[in-house]
Image (spheres, rainbow, N blue to C red):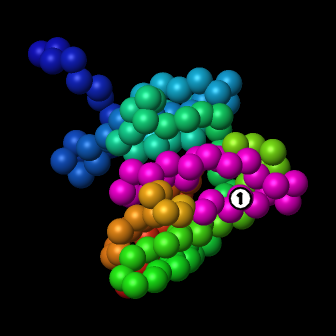
Amino acid sequence: IDRGGEWLEGQFCKDDPCPPGACCLPDESCEVLRKQECTDRQGQWYEGKACNEIECPLCNGREAIKRPKCKTWRGKVKKVTVKVIRGTPGEEYTATLDTGQIMKKSASQRGKVKFKFTRDDAPECGSNGVTVCDKHRDFDCDC
């Protein structure tokens, strides 16, 4: 009986549900694909994301997020600094906090990017996280 599914040799749906996600392809287009199909096409995959939730161009895959630093004063977060290393020089990167704040910056000639979330862009005290490319890093702003 054909029910519109996709046969995956040697895989069980209950063990590997193969969720789709946005895939930035080498031509800077985006398609919603499964992780393996995205990888096979040399794309950068974003689990659970739709194409309208991310921005291509493709990240180089070597980027790393250093531990974010919080500056607090009188029980409020005044600034969160997020540093990315090993980026592509001149490439624009987007940092998205779990609380929804978004910032774009271009990488320096050394491939470094520094995002500073301040004032209204700073998150509340407590647990948070940041995503750049397909990398995610949790952090805590203790107040």
- Residue projecting furthest to the top: 2
Give, as a three-letter code, the residue at label 1. Answer: Val
Asked whether residue 56 is in view, the answer is yes
Crowd class of label 1 (few under 14; some 14 to 19; many from 20; radius 10 Å): many
Horizontally, residue 69 falls left or right of residue 123, namely right
Q: Identify the image quadrant of the C terminus.
A: bottom left
Picture mark count:
1
Looking at the picture, does residue 139 appear above or below residue 101? below
Looking at the picture, does residue 106 appear above or below residue 52? below
Horizontally, residue 29 falls left or right of residue 53, namely right
Q: Is residue 107 magenta?
A: yes
Q: Identify the image quadrant of the N terminus.
A: top left
Instruction: Give the residue displayed 28% in from the left and 48% down from the top.
Output: 16
Instruction: Give the residue displayed 19% in from the left and 47% down from the top.
Output: 14
Image coords of residue 108 (percent x, y): 82, 55
Horizontally, residue 108 falls left or right of residue 13, namely right
Instruction: Give the residue displayed 85% in from the left and 60% down from the top.
Output: 110
Q: Which residue is mark 1?
A: 113
* Quarter residue 39 falls in: top right
Horizontally, residue 86 falls left or right of residue 70, namely right
Asked whether residue 64 is in view, the answer is no
Image coords of residue 7 (percent x, y): 29, 29
* Quarter residue 9 falls in: top left
Front position in the image: 136 or 127? 127
* Range shown magenta: 93-116
Image coords of residue 135 (percent x, y): 53, 57
* Quarter residue 35 falls in: top left
Front position in the image: 36 or 141? 141
Instruction: Give the residue displayed 60% in from the left and 63% down from the top.
Output: 116
Looking at the picture, does residue 100 appear above or below residue 124? above
